[in-house]
Image (tube, rainbow, N blue to C red):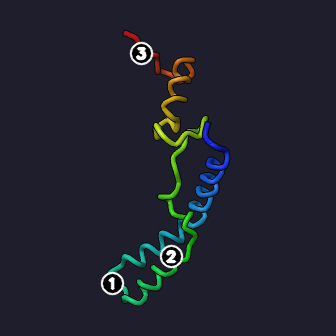
Amino acid sequence: MAKKSAIERNRRRQKLVAKYAGKRERLKKIAADESLPQEERFAARLKLAELPRNSSATRVRNRCEISGRPRGYYRKLRLSRIALRSLASEGRIPGMVKSSW
């Protein structure tokens, strides 16, 4: 299991990303718009830099819903490979059976 502090830090980042998503998107559109004057685009970039760093979506780490493990993560199931295997062995994931040969 991952450290609780790391899991909680990631949750706070997710909340910040959700809070600033609209503002960030608007500023990025302004900064990328070639038809606007250069000063206005530069001002948008400065405002974007003033936003909290943790409000960027790239700073959020995908973590397992059960264990909080950051590695070996399956996006579709939102589980780590270890949690997936244990749930599959218990028969708690529909349609998934333990492989044997």
Instruction: Please say if the residues under marks 2 and 3 sit with CB atoms less than 8 Å apart.
Output: no
Query: Quadrant of the image for the C terminus?
Result: top left
- Residue at x 50% of width, y 35% of height: 77
Q: Residue at x 37, y 76 (%)?
A: 32
- How far, Cα to Cα, is label 2 from label 1? 22 Å
Residue located beneath label 2 in the image = 49
Q: Secondary structure at mark 1?
A: loop
Real-space CA distance between mark 2 and mark 3, rounded to the nearest whole angstrom: 50 Å
Please give the name of the residue rendered at 52% of the width and 80% of the height, measured from the top-left corner: 47
Q: Earlier in the sequence, mark 2 or mark 3?
A: 2
The answer to which of marks 2 and 1 sits earlier in the sequence is: 1
- Comes first in the chain, label 1 or label 3: 1
Helix, strand or loop at disc 3? loop
In this view of the protein, which residue sits in the foreground, 94 or 62? Answer: 62
For the residues carrying marks 1 and 3, which lies nearer the camera in this image?
Answer: 3
Residue with the mark numbered 1: 35
* Residue bearing the label numbered 3: 99
Q: Give the image location of residue 7, x and y in percent.
A: 62, 47
Task: Give the left or right position of residue 51, taking residue 29 as reference.
Answer: right
Q: Amino acid at mark 2?
A: Ala
Quarter of the image for residue 17 reads bottom right
